[in-house]
Every structure is written in structure tokens, then in C-alpha cells.
Amino acid sequence: MDGWTAPSAIERELYEAKRRGDWPGYLDALARAELFLPQARADVDADPRAARFHPGPAGLAVYTRGVLPSPGPDTVFLRQSLAWFANAWDHRDPAHLAVNPGTPAEAYLTTTPADRARWRAHWDAAPSWGLTPGALHALHTGGPLHGPVAHGLAVGAHLSVSNGEFWNSLAHHGNGYTHERDRLRTSWGVTDPAGWFDVLQRMLDAEIVSPVWEYALRVRRLLASDFAGPVDVEHWRDAAEASLRHGAMKAAEPQLTPDGVTAAEPRPAAEVEGEIAGVRRLIGRIARYEQRFRADGLLPEDGWVRSVHAWDLGRGSQMARWGVAARYGTLEDAERAVLRAGAAARGAYRSWEEFSAGYSLGRCLHFDEEEFGRWYGSSLATHLTLTTDPASPYRNIPWQ
């Protein structure tokens, strides 16, 4: 099996320890790994809090992330730790825990009280559990590394890195069926396939990101196109104000319709002035973020952000995978969605770096409130990881 390509670093470490006969090392690696327990979906839907053991002839099968099968409609997986199994086991349970059965990294661990005490000791000594958030993780087999689907998945790589997930897993299980359903419910109010599909489409159409943010950036894009150079902040503010005033005046003009002339009520002056003041403040916020982006290497010295549609498109690429993990969508649904996310990103930006800057600005405008705190820091760190790591999809997948 020397030529075996492990699906991920997790299985590679287990395989290498097994090949050396280093069973303490195997247990060290296993204690750091998430273990996924297969369950009948109907049982979990009936009682999401329960985890049931369904042993086979060789024992109770569990799987690490990289060897999970493609999500199917009837079987789901719950994420547990080695310590959880040590504590949940009793004398009525199987004599073996079958880890990754049928793969070169497989092991059949005996389950006596002494064995389970050893599992807990390795768990207690483990410095971490699961894939490290903030680091780049990939499937070496079982996930696309090149081509259009990989490009569309890489559009969501900011979230994959910050959440500690494989960036290229289209056949996605995430952190297990119940966790993924909880995430969609609590973060997006999604509880069924129709709700998932609606949010996904809105993201892919860039309809969730603030239209005011995009309006302000569009004004500058037009100015930059007209003047073929940098746009002064005050010029940008004045142009945005003039555009808003013109729009308010046009909206107040009588409209000719098939039914005749329709009178229009002018907007209240206070409303228009408040909108203008808000956009002028927003332009100042954007300018200050971009100044910091340039200082920290998130933008080049003369760079600026073209659009914040990346904020929606990146989340849309991820939403496609979350729907598969929660069984709200199929693999075919997810593939169409990530291809669409990739095409939309290429239409709005000219490089991975530009896309990443747009995503980062959207995230900061939404969460950071100019504190330049953890939301800014994590966005910067993820951008630098994706643009500098030799294994990053940003370094290995052409933008166009």
C-alpha cells in the first residue's frame, strides 16, 4: 500500500502509524480526529439527541472525515470524539471499534475497560481536536482540485479556512448531520429544502449583501472608468450625493403610463438628506478599511475594492455544501450552485486577490464596525493564507 494516496492528512497519519506498528501513535492521531458514526436518518429525525450503535460483524464502524462516503438520502453521520466512545461504551456493546474499515488506515480496536481508559488518556493528552480553524485543509482524493467545480468551491474557501473544513469537499458532511441542520436553522432560519433553495438563490444572485454598499462602490467604479485613475474620497462622496439627489428628483416627476400621466409624490426631504448622509459616512468607512487593507497587504498599494458581491458568492458556494450535509439538496444541486458561484465571481472580479478583498470588505462591513478586532483579524489571516500557501486553490487554480 506504499502507493496509496490518503484522502487527507488525517488518514495519512493513521496509516503511517499503523504501518510502523506504532499503536500509541495511532491512538494519538485518533484522539485528535473527529469520528463519524453512521445512523439511520429516520431515527435521527425522530430523535436528534440520541446516537445509536448499529454494529456489524467486525464491530462498530466509525469513519474519519476523509473516508466518509458520498451523502445519501437514508444514512447520515454524527460527529463524536474518541473520548465520547470511551464513555458511551458498556459491556453490551461490540468487542471492537472498527476505524475506517475497508481502507489501508483501518484498525479494529478492542474495547475492554482498560482499552477505553487508554482512549481517554490519549484524548486527555491531545493538544486539539478536529481540523484546525484558520488553516488550509484539502481532500487529496474524493474532492476536485482543478477545473470549474474546484474553482466554484474555492470561491467559498474563506469560510472553509475559517471554519476548519476541507475547501474542496462537494460531497459534504460538515460537522455531522445534526450540527449542519442546527447551523442552517440558527444562522439562516432554514428548516427545509425550499428554505435552503431560496437562501441559496439569493446568495448566488448577490441579493443578501447590502445594496447600499454595492451602490457606493458602483459609483466609484464608474468614476474610475471615466477618469482612468484614482478617485479622491471627497469626489466620490460628492458624486454619490449628486446621484442620489438626481434619483430623488426623477422619482418625483410625473410618469407616463398606458393609463395616462401618473403623479408622483416627492420623497420627504429629511429622508433624502438622511440617505445622503448615510452614504457619505459609508464611503468614509470603506476608505478607512481600504487604507488598512493596503497597509496589511490585503490590497496592493494602489488597490481598491470593486464590489462586495463576493460576500454573497462565497457564502453561496458554502450554502450549496451545507444543503448537501443537511440533506436539503443533492450533489447535483450543489454542483450547479458552485459552478454558478464561480461564473458570477469571474464576472465581477479579475483575480483571486480582488475577489478575496471584496469578500473581506463585505465581512468587515457586516461584523467589524471599524473595531479592527477579531473579525478583521481573521479575514486578514485567511486572505494571507489563501494567497500565499503553496497548496492553496488560489495559487493552483487559474482565475479565468
Image (cartoon, rainbow, N blue to C red):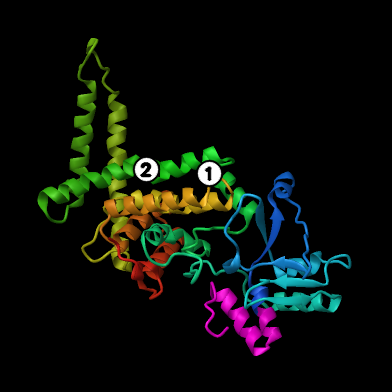
Find out whether residue 24 is within the magenta segment: yes
Q: Which region of the structure is painted magenta?
A: 1-28
- Which badge, 2 or 1, is on the more N-terminal residue? 1
Q: Badge 2: few (under 14), some or many (20 or more) residues near its Cα, within 10 Å?
A: some
Closer to us: 373 or 303: 303
Give the image location of residue 217, x and y in percent.
26, 47
Where is mark 1, residue-wise? 188
Residue 163 appears in view: yes
Horizontal side, residue 244 vs residue 82: left or right: left
* Residue sitting nearer the eye, 16 or 180: 16
Q: Residue at x 71, y 47 (%)?
A: 42
Look at the numbered disc 2 and give the secondary structure of its residue: loop
Which residue does the image show at 74% across and 47% down from the upper left?
A: 47
Can residue 365 be seen here? Answer: no
Residue 360: where, in percent of width, then height? Answer: 37, 57
Q: Amino acid at mark 1?
A: Trp
Question: For numbered disc 1, what is the local secondary structure?
Answer: helix
Check the picture and name the quadrant holding the C terminus: bottom left
Judging by the rendered image, the residue that carries numbered circle 2 is: 205
How far apart are the alpha carbons under marks 2 and 1? 17 Å
* Tally of marks: 2
Residue 215 rendering spot, x and y as whole percentages: 28, 42
- Residue at 60% across, 59% down: 175
